[in-house]
Amino acid sequence: MMNARKALRQAIVSTTVATAVCLTPPSLLSAQGNIVLPPQANGGPQTNVAQPAQLSAQDSRIARAANPQTSGGVFLADRRAARSGMIESDMPSQQGISLQSMIANPTPAPQPPVASAPGSQPTQIPDQAIANSSPDPNASQQFDVSQVLGDITKTGTLDADEIRELDAPWWREHAERQMDPSLQAVPASVNDLIRMTLENSAQVQVYQKTPQIRETAVTQAASAFDWTHFLDATWNDINEPVGSSLTVGNRGDRFNDHNLIFNTGVRRKLLGGGTFETYQRLGHQDTNSQFFQPSDQGTARLVLGYTQPLMRGRGETYNTSLVLLAKIDVRRAQDEYQRQLQQHLLEVARGYWSLYLERAKLAQKISLYLKTKVNVDHLTERQAVDAQRTQLIQATAALESRRSDLIRAKAAVSNAETRLRALINAPYLTDTTEILPLDHPALHYVSPVLYDEFSIAMRNRPEIRGAMKEIRAACVRQNMAQHEMMPVLNLVTNTYLAGLRGDSQVGDAWLDQFRDGAPSYSAGLEWELPIGRRAASANLRRRQLERVQLGERYRATLELIRAEVEVAVREVNTSYQELSAKNRARRAAEAEAETLEIRWRSLGGRDNNGALTLEALLQAQERVALAEQELAQAQLTYSLSLINLRHANGTLLQMDTGPQIITSDETPNLPVTPLPHGSHPQQDASVYAPSPATQSIARQFGVNSESANASPTQHQTGFAPVHIAKPDVAIERKNR
């Protein structure tokens, strides 16, 4: 193992020194290939020493520019070694080392002094000086975290030039341009897709039906206090033996009774818990008893009855609790509908920006493919002159690899469109159409404050409102359980009027009940109490535990929403700072690729230098494409972070001018969503009237504010408030 490490160290030293010699201008090389430094400013002697570790990146570029014939392969090896951190800082200093001797003898031997220019003596640099100038290998492990992160934060903002540059990158035009002429182009902005979703999405219709279904429970609970009409008729024919002479007298030994009874009336449960009932009874009866006078009797009775609970079941609060619970359940369903709707619209916005990103990536991969094709064509033309076959094979392999990337990128665009169409369900968006993004990512800087955003979320998040309604419902159930601990004590009253006529004169009997006699009445009390009241006690305990549980759930919901808002705020700041870093990385990658391309075209192809430079150029071009993709991803990440922030604070469906709402006496406030005019994104420009909230809504969905002020042909749609309402429920309320 020690021998292997020693051999590796010697190989690195040899490569580094050889690189230094290759990169040194001819004016600084002696006849033997040694490095001879120019005279010092004070007239001191020259220095004749190989010190590759002392060459900076700028010196290397100067050396390459001064000597284009220098071996590029050794320079690449030096770069790779330096990148991997394998250059030894404690490399022994050797004087007068030639390139041939370094290759032939891995262990450098002392060389005799080399004759320098007349009038000057070679000066040797002490080993200690070289050692002191070598970098500390542990320096990268000793740092102040706060200082480093502070420096990064200072350089994380975009200046005006960067904003102008990022506002119109070269791939933006291609991302917004039609790619397949055989398909029908459908230009659409984010808000166009939002409108299409609200109009056509089957999933939105599923979400919308839930509150309508829950609304029926309110009517069902309130129907307990409706009037009830009842009607019954009974025919009794009795034929039984007589056990007493007083039953029929001397008219036989069996009792015959024919009785027809007819009742009709209404009853109703009152809000206070009492039950009111009134009915009219008409009858006809005939028997064989000699004591039944008059015969063929017609009877009539008008009855009024009222029962009022005095303990359990009394009071409007208890008796309307089920109605209140049904209303709370409807409001919870509407909060859930808003949450699901915002989540679905958020997915639509994410799908839109994903499509934009995939189209941008496709344009970037096409650019990389065309650059590689130019290199292949250049090598093909110069194959008979100085291009090596290995270079052509290498470039062709890269070309085919990037051709396969194009196939996958095109499929990614189609997949993104498919997912977006599945979210929208618009009938005119099919596999024969191509969605063309009209909006491009936003670059305006937003500096959210965590406390303010959390306060907004407290007022607007449907999850918080839903949790509060659950607690309110739990309190109602607990109060009902507490009320049901009381015993049953009812006041029962009854009064009636009666009339009777013979010869089957039922009509006259009905009139006699109002003309003859006085009303009869009765009053009494009913008492009932389960011994031990175990069922009521268990129910009360259950409701108390449920209320405590929902209180903890509310607190957990607050903590989760606070964490979500905190992450959203941090993501806005982080993604904006990331834009500047990604843009600088792209610039550096482009500069590297341009430099390598100039070097590759200036070099001949008859040696290994051209092959190594071509390899570096292909890798650099791929790094440029990767940097452009990361920059496009960073732009979309910032736009999505703005959307996620509005989703986190619950204002995704609101205007900055304030939420416009529709109200009723039974349902909570429903938000009004700003939507574009018209039914199709391609309309006359006169239809799109600008509104004050246009820029605000555009910012909600991560759209550049400039595109929010343009005409439809300039990526703009006007907005008008459209109710997210339930027309069936509204009609039902009106009828009721």
Image: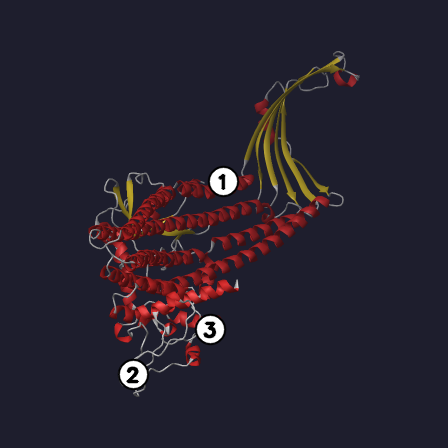
Query: Percent x, y for residue 243?
Result: 79, 17
Q: CA distance from mark 2 to mark 1?
A: 99 Å
Mark 2 vs mark 1: give the one in front.
2
| Observer able to see residue 97 | yes
Amino acid carrying mark 2 in the image? Pro
Contact between labelled residues 3 and 1, with CB atoms less than 8 Å apart = no
Q: Secondary structure at mark 1?
A: helix
Can you say which quadrant of the picture contains the C terminus?
top left
In percent of the image, x 44 and y 43: which residue is there?
207
* In front of the other: 636 or 137: 137
Q: Which mark is residue 139?
A: 3
Amino acid carrying mark 3 in the image? Ala
Q: Secondary structure at mark 2?
A: loop
Query: Percent x, y for residue 520?
Result: 66, 35
Give the crowd class for mark 3: few <14, some 14-19, many >=20 residues within 10 Å.
Answer: few
Residue furthest bottom in the image: 42
Query: Percent x, y for residue 585?
Result: 34, 63
**Disc 2 target residue:** 39
Q: Earlier in the sequence, mark 2 or mark 1?
A: 2
Give the crowd class for mark 1: few <14, some 14-19, many >=20 residues within 10 Å.
Answer: some
Contact between labelled residues 2 and 3, with CB atoms less than 8 Å apart = no
Residue 207 in the figure: left or right of residue 42: right
Q: Earlier in the sequence, mark 3 or mark 2?
A: 2
Residue 619 in the figure: left or right of residue 499: left
| Observer able to see residue 15 | no
Give the crowd class for mark 2: few <14, some 14-19, many >=20 residues within 10 Å.
Answer: some
**Disc 1 target residue:** 216
The quarter of the displayed image where residue 488 is located: top right
Q: Earlier in the sequence, mark 1 or mark 3?
A: 3
* In front of the other: 438 or 223: 438
